[in-house]
């Protein structure tokens, strides 16, 4: 997926880099060549740049991202031409979703090692946390089968590796966002989207995460 990035905050740029690292995104130098245009909005003056890009790039999907939890600003971005508005921390998740919609060819899966099963036998909560190009891969087990959720927290990029897990809910230690262990759905903000879930398989005495398909 060809993406043009117009500036960005630290968290947003890190999200784009993760998407580049796993082959979801290829960066281009000019908006005219892009399928997706990513724009940071931090203040009202950024909306004028957004309107200009919308006027000159009628076919591209325009994604506005921001660290501000300001409903009025998000609505103004939509009125100014953004197809999607997301918090900066949730940008990589959205780019993966857009890439999945744009691809039509058959893609293969990869296995990512998480931990040895013997090392975490009997443990509950977040039993392993692995840094990967996709993000922070957290192996979580509460009552049922282990699941793998992808961090960091989409609100401000906080690590969830030591987050509290209780009654099927993960709570971010920084700002209190909550997500369901089963599926990663957002329960409570300030995060405005959930966590991506990866399928987990057990083989050869290890737990493995099944990566999103890559071409």
Image (cartoon, helix red, strand yellow):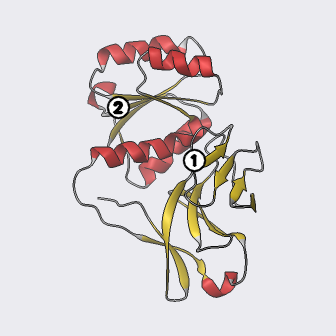
Q: Which residue corresponds to the image point at 37% horizontal and 42% vertical from the top-left?
A: 98
Give above or below for 28 relative to 166.
above
Spot occupied by residue 58 in the image (x, y as percentages of width and height): 28, 20
Query: Is disc 1 placed on a helix, strand or loop?
Result: loop
Spot occupied by residue 122 in the image (x, y as percentages of width and height): 72, 83
Count of numbered badges drawn on the protein = 2
Q: Which residue corresponds to the image point at 58% horizontal and 12% vertical from the top-left?
A: 44
**Disc number placed over residue 95 in the picture, else none:** none
Spot occupied by residue 192 in the image (x, y as percentages of width and height): 60, 37
User: Circle 2 sits on which residue?
Assistant: 29
Query: Is disc 2 placed on a helix, strand or loop?
Result: loop
Q: Which residue corresponds to the image point at 27% horizontal and 49% vertical from the top-left?
A: 103
**Disc number placed over residue 194 in the picture, else none:** 1
Foreground of the two, 67 or 198? 198
Side of 68 where 50 appears, left or right: left
Question: Do the CB atoms of the residues marked 1 and 2 lie less than 8 Å apart?
Answer: no
Task: Work out which quarter of the rendered image holds the N terminus and state it.
Answer: top left
């Amino acid at each position: 997926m060809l993406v043009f990035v117009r500036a960005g905050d630290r968290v947003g740029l890190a999200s784009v880099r993760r998407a580049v690292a796993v082959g979801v995104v290829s960066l281009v130098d000019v908006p005219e060549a892009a399928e997706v245009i990513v724009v940071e909005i931090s203040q009202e003056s950024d909306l004028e740049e957004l309107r200009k890009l919308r006027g000159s790039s009628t076919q591209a999907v325009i994604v506005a991202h921001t660290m501000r939890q300001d409903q009025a600003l998000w609505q103004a971005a939509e009125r100014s031409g953004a197809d999607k508005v997301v918090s900066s921390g949730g940008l990589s998740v959205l780019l993966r979703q857009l890439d999945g919609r744009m691809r039509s060819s058959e893609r293969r899966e990869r296995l990512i090692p998480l931990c040895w099963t013997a090392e975490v036998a009997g443990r509950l909560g977040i039993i392993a946390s692995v840094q990967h190009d996709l993000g922070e891969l957290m192996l979580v087990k509460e009552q049922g089968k282990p699941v793998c959720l992808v961090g960091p927290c989409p609100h401000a990029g906080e690590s969830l590796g030591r987050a509290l897990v209780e009654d099927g809910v993960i709570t971010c230690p920084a700002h209190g966002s909550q997500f369901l262990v089963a599926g990663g759905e957002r329960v409570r903000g300030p995060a405005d989207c959930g966590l991506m879930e990866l399928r987990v398989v057990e083989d050869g005495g290890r737990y493995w995460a099944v990566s999103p398909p890559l071409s």
